[in-house]
Image: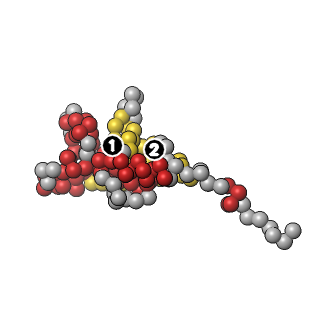
């Protein structure tokens, strides 16, 4: 088994500037369900920044950064208790499958000025005996 960890922090102001400068910012990076979630919030920008950070963290878990797949291949949602959850699609799912990753745990936190996230996954079968040092002198 192998542990994969990714973290990210982003300034909410950076997301605001990107949002203000590009009318397609949300549509390019987020799924319709994610956009609906943002629209349900009074203060959208910290939530947008949190999801942006989460996608960055997940891309680090996958070991690729946001490369080789679309931002929309990672969807952030919430479970029945309100905890953030991850849905991988398309090429991002293919990358996770190749690494043996079946589930990614995610934590997101934000203030008015920063958003931070941490993603953790377990995957890949590893032969533990290969890690053992042997004494070949016997």
Q: Nearer the viewer, residue 58 or 125?
A: 125
> What residue is at 25 percent from the left and 45 percent from the top?
30
User: Residue at position x 80%, y 67% from top?
Assistant: 135
Q: In the displayed orientation, state which residue is furthest to the right.
A: 138
Position in image of residue 48 (x %, y %): 25, 45
Quadrant containing the C terminus is bottom right
Q: Toward which corner of the image does residue 10 lie, by quadrant?
A: bottom left
Instruction: Tell me what residue is drawn at x 33 percent, y 55 percent.
Output: 69
**Local SS, label 1:** strand
Tell me if label 1 and label 2 are in contact, CB under 8 Å: no
Circle 1 residues within 10 Å: few <14, some 14–19, many ≥20: many
In the picture, the disc for residue 94 is: none
Write the residue at 17% across / 55% down.
17
Task: List x then y, in percent, for residue 124.
Answer: 55, 51
Residue 118 seen: no
User: Going by the image, does 58 lie left or right of 71?
Assistant: right
Distance between the alpha carbons at the discs numbered 1 and 2: 12 Å
Residue 59 seen anywhere in this rendered image of the structure = yes
On screen, 132 above or below 45?
A: below
Circle 2 sits on which residue?
104
Q: Nearer the viewer, residue 123 or 20?
A: 123
Residue 127: % across, % down:
65, 55
Residue 90 located left or right of residue 133: left
Mark 1 or mark 2: whose residue is earlier in sequence: 1
- Neighbour class for label 2 at 10 Å: few (<14), some, many (≥20)? many
Residue 136 position, x and y percent, is 81, 69
Indicate which disc residue 75 carries. 1
What secondary structure is marked by label 2? strand
Disc count in the image? 2
Please tell me which residue lies in front, 130 or 23: 130
Q: Is residue 17 left or right of residue 84?
A: left
């Amino acid at each position: 088994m192998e542990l994969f960890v990714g973290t990210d922090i982003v300034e909410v102001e950076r997301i605001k500037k990107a949002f203000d400068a590009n009318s397609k910012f949300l549509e390019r990076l987020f799924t319709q369900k994610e956009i609906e979630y943002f629209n349900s919030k009074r203060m959208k920008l910290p939530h947008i920044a949190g999801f942006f950070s989460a996608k960055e963290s997940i891309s680090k878990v996958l070991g690729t950064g946001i490369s080789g797949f679309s931002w929309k291949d990672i969807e952030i949602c919430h479970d029945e208790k309100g905890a953030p959850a991850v849905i991988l699609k398309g090429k991002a799912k293919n990358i996770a499958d190749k690494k043996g990753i079946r589930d990614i745990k995610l934590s997101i936190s934000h203030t008015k000025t920063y958003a931070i996230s941490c993603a953790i996954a377990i995957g890949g079968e590893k032969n533990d005996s290969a890690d053992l040092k042997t004494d070949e002198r016997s």
